[in-house]
Image: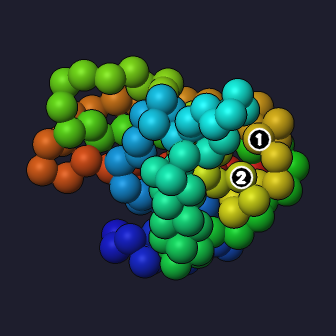
């Protein structure tokens, strides 16, 4: 099944399926400025890019409780899985869900793919 067909089918069933760029580490998303924690330039750019890409793939706000499956394809055999999840989840707030407290179930898997690093995210209303 082609991605466009998969996305169309998901839209009809209260699901969202996304393929997004490999996220930066949470350590790079935030900076300290004058004693305050702020979103870094890398973080702002990542969130902006994710919003455009997710909407182009049919993302919309889902209501109610959500289940999320993350498949992270990392470019190198290093890095924490959960670090990349948080970055992607934060970037999708306001794009796929109003608040991350809606997420009551998380599944996460890590793979290696140095030629095509990415994160595949499936959100589903439950």
- Seen in the picture, residue 48 relative to 85 is either above or below; the reply is below
Q: Quadrant of residue 14?
A: bottom right
Q: Is residue 85 visible?
A: no
- Name the residue nearer the viewer: 25 or 69: 25
User: Could you tell me which quadrant the N terminus lies in?
Assistant: bottom left
Residue 30 on image: x %, y %: 57, 37
Q: Which residue is mark 2?
A: 93
Cα–Cα span, label 1 and label 2: 7 Å
- Seen in the picture, residue 55 relative to 100 is either above or below; the reply is below
Q: Residue at x 48, y 29 (%)?
A: 27
- Seen in the picture, residue 1 relative to 105 is either above or below; the reply is below
Q: Residue furthest front?
A: 34
58 horizontally vs 97: left or right: left
Residue 29 on image: x %, y %: 52, 40
Q: Are marks 1 and 2 in contact (CB under 8 Å)?
A: yes
79 horizontally vs 10: left or right: left
Q: Quadrant of residue 54?
A: bottom right
Q: Which residue is mark 1?
A: 100
- Name the residue nearer the viewer: 41 or 14: 41
Whichever of labels 1 and 2 marks the residue nearer the N terminus, that label is: 2
Q: Is residue 61 visible?
A: yes
Residue 26 on image: x %, y %: 50, 33
85 horizontally vs 72: left or right: right
Q: Residue at x 49, y 66 (%)?
A: 49
Q: Residue at x 69, y 59 (%)?
A: 96
Residue 65 on image: x %, y %: 82, 43
Q: Secondary structure at mark 2?
A: loop
Label 2, residues with CA under 10 Å away: few <14, some 14-19, many ≥20: some
Q: Quadrant of residue 55?
A: bottom right
- Name the residue nearer the viewer: 86 or 6: 86
- Name the residue nearer the viewer: 29 or 9: 29
Q: Secondary structure at mark 1?
A: helix
């Amino acid at each position: 099944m082609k991605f466009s067909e998969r996305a169309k089918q998901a839209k009809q069933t209260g699901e969202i399926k996304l393929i997004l760029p490999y996220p930066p580490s949470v350590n790079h998303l935030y900076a300290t400025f004058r004693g305050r924690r702020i979103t870094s330039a890398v973080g702002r750019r990542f969130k902006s890019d994710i919003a455009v890409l997710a909407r182009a793939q049919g993302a919309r706000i889902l209501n109610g409780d959500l289940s999320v499956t993350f498949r992270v394809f990392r470019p190198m055999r290093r890095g924490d899985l959960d670090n990349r999840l948080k970055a992607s989840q934060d970037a999708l707030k306001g794009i796929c869900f109003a608040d991350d407290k809606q997420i009551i179930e998380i599944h996460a898997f890590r793979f290696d793919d140095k030629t095509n690093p990415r994160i595949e995210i499936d959100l589903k209303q439950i």
